[in-house]
Image: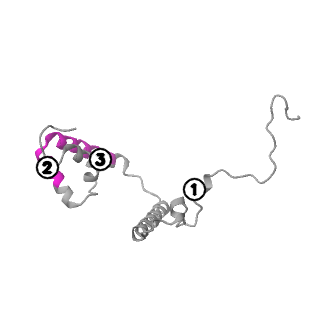
Amino acid sequence: MSCGEPHETDCSEVLSHLYEYLDREMPDSDCAKYEEHFDECSPCLEKYGLEQEVKKLVKRCCGQDDVPSDLRSKVMGRIEVIRAGQAGAEDDPAGPSPSAESGASERPTGEPDARAASAPQQSTGPQEPLPSAEHPRPA
């Protein structure tokens, strides 16, 4: 989308980062640049206002559920593990370790990784053939 007017910051750039702006997840210098754009571009300001109202509505209607404290601590622990891994990868010019690339990681709660739990289990015992029309199972 573009309003057709020349701006220092293009409308498509502003709209593609609108949620980052709404959530204040961008540097202050970028926020100032977008605020300037909204001051001079009414279509983008209208879109911003609409998205801001939707966000308020969602918060009012869906933001009342309390998160169980154990879930919150598990999620926060996992975030810290991921952040520590990213910080280590940035410091290591060789890149991430093989275990990080394969997705293997230690769980902060000592629980098995959900990916491993959902992986198909290999059977070690003999397999019984499935019944068919030619070879029905005995009754």
Dominant secondary structure of the residues highlighted in magenta in the image: helix
Which callout, 2 or 3, points at the residue further toward the start of the chain? 2
Residue depth check, mark 2 versus mark 3: number of the one nearer the observer: 2
CA distance for labels 3 and 1: 32 Å
Place of residue 10 in the rendered image (x, y in percent of width and height, measured from the top left): 18, 45
Q: Residues within 10 Å of mark 2 (few under 14, many from 20)?
A: few
Q: Is residue 11 above or below residue 110?
A: above
Q: Which residues are magenta?
A: 33-58
The quarter of the image holding the N terminus is top left
Query: The disc labelled 2 sits on which kind of residue?
Result: Glu
| Tag 2 secondary structure | loop
Neighbour tally class for label 1: few under 14, some 14-19, many 20 plus, Cα within 10 Å? few
Nearer to the camera, 90 or 15: 90
Does the CB distance between marks 2 and 3 fall below 8 Å?
no
x and y percent of residue 76 in the render? 44, 64
Q: Which is more N-terminal, label 1 or label 2?
A: 2
State how far apart marks 2 and 1 are (Cα).
Answer: 47 Å
Disc 3: which residue: 55
User: Within 10 Å of the Cα at label 3, are there few (<14), some (14-19), or many (20+) other Cα atoms?
Assistant: some
Quadrant of the drawing holding the C terminus: top right
* Residue type at the position of mark 3: Lys
Residue shown at 80%/52% (left/top)? 125
Left or right of residue 58, residue 13 in this image = left
Q: Which mark is residue 8?
A: 2
Residue at the image position 81 percent from the left and 35 percent from the top: 131
